Every structure is written in structure tokens, then in C-alpha cells.
Amino acid sequence: MPEDVNGLRPRLMSIAYRMLGSVADAEDAVQDAFVRLQSAGGVSSPEGFLVRTTTRLCIDRLRERKRREYIGPWIPAPVETRGPADDPALAESLTRAFLLLLERLSASERAAFLLRTVFDYEYAEIAEVVGKSEAAVRQLVSRARQRLGSDAGRRPAARPERADGLAERFLAACRSGDVKAVEAMLAEDVESHSDGGGKVTAARVVIRGRERVARFLTGIFRKRRLQHATPAYVNGEPGLAFHADGRLVSVLSLRVEDDVKGIYITVNPDKLARWPSAEVE
């Protein structure tokens, strides 16, 4: 396959991951698109074919996923990034808070909204991708904006001077057992999401509120004191990867505005399997 076509993989992965919130499913969709390209004849624009096929495969997967049950809170699989992206809009669209917002949208709305607002495709191009008229695509994007409401307003990631060392300070506060020290780092309306997928022990509900979250965190980190923590940028935000006996057991990321507003803890081993190798921009 031509090298310039293989160079499209990061862009296709970036679309598929934002659509699905799953590294494994995104990789499968992209690989399937390349397989279909190999067997297709007379393709004048390989890039257009791959974007269209990847997006449509993702739409099919999302519709299938809606018919399945998931045990406990679902959060997107973590991806390791080098740091905050240069493009604020692209960086925000990779955060787990933003990806969770997209769960409000239908599969077609999500595709149209992402291709237009994140990847800057023209409406005519999106119409070809999703197989609808340009007018219908405009309606999809408009409806998506309405469903997301004010939450769709992109907030900048933590400033570098705030993000530097933040995860380590957060970990130290949690491991200290000092609930008040943890509370001091949290926003009043903070949320803690734990995703075990029924595979390992995790909180079965989203925990909300500064005091409840602080007590929850000091409790779980007291039990995990022997785990080795490595700082990382997770989906462009400060985070930590935890290992026990040389095995990755958890990835945590922090949503930071003025204070820590969201904590996302992934312990589902299926979602950790592709860390940190995903090609996502």
C-alpha cells in the first residue's frame, strides 16, 4: 500500500477514537477501512474513501453499542499524549469530559459534529461521508449543538504552569489520607468516574460533590499505596499510570479548570490493553 496512504492512519485514528471512545474499536474500524480500500477498484481519492468508510463503520459500531449493557459508569479508554496540543480546539475534543458529552448525540449527529467542528470539513464533504444531503448535515450539526448546549463551549486545558506537577501533588494529597487537603484541590461540583466494566472492582456510580469525592479518593488510594505511579498526559490532561508487579492496573486523568473538576479512573483491563501505543492526535 502506498506510503502516503499509510500516513493517513493517525488522522483516521483521531476521527475513529473520538467517534467511539475506544482505542481497540477505533483500530478495528481503521484497519477494516484499509482492507476495503485494497479490494475496491477505481478509487480516485483514497483519503476520501478511507475517511468515509472509517466514519460509516464507526456509526455502525455506535448503533450496535447502544443495544448493549455496560456495568457501571462508562468512560472513554485513555490515550497517552505528549502534552497539551498546540490547537486548543483539537486538544479539548480529545479530553474525556468532551468525549463523554458526545454520548448525548446520535451516531450521525456525532459524526457530523466532529467532522465539522473538530476536523473542519466542509458541509458538502461531510454530506458525502455520511450519505446525506448538505441540508441534512447542517441540521445534524445544529441539532448536535443544541443537545450539547452551553457544555459544548470549549474550555482550555490546564495552563502548563498549573498542569506541571499537578498529578503528583494530587496523588500525594490523596495518599496522605488528609481529606481536607484533597478537598482543597477540588471544585465544589467535582465528579469522579470509575470504569471497571464489571471486570474489576470499581465504583458503580458517578460520585459527585467535593466532600464525597475527597473521602472516596483517600479511601481508594489508602488501599493502593503500594502501586507505582508514573506521571503522564492522558488525553491531553494531567494524569497518572499505575503499575503493580510490572503490570498496568489503572490510568487516571484530571479535568482541571480553576480546580480539579473531574477525575476519570480506568481500571477495566480491556481499556488498558492498548496503553500507551495508540496513534491518536
Image (cartoon, helix red, strand yellow):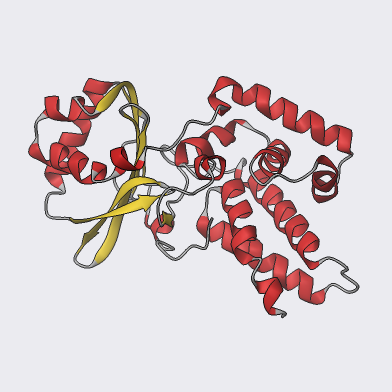
Q: Position of residue 96 (x, y in %)?
A: 46, 41
Residue 120 appears in which quarter of the rendering? top right
Q: Residue at x 72, y 26 (%)?
A: 143
Q: Is residue 7 visible?
A: yes
Q: Position of residue 198 (x, y in %)?
A: 38, 46
Residue 6 appears in which quarter of the rendering? bottom right
Q: Nearer the viewer, residue 89 or 272?
A: 89
Residue 89 vs 39, above or below: the answer is above
Q: How many marks?
A: 0
Relative to 132, 57 lies left or right: left
Q: Nearer the viewer, residue 205 or 256?
A: 256
| Quadrant, the C terminus | bottom right
Q: Nearer the viewer, residue 132 or 11?
A: 11
| Quadrant, the N terminus | bottom right
Relative to 163, 46 lies left or right: right
Relative to 159, 21 lies left or right: right
Q: Is residue 202 visible?
A: no
Q: Position of residue 159 (x, y in %)?
A: 37, 38
Residue 49 appears in which quarter of the rendering? bottom right
Residue 38 vs 277, above or below: the answer is below
Residue 34 vs 180, above or below: the answer is below
Q: Position of residue 203 (x, y in %)?
A: 31, 37
Residue 226 vs 160, above or below: the answer is below
Q: Residue at x 58, y 36 (%)?
A: 102
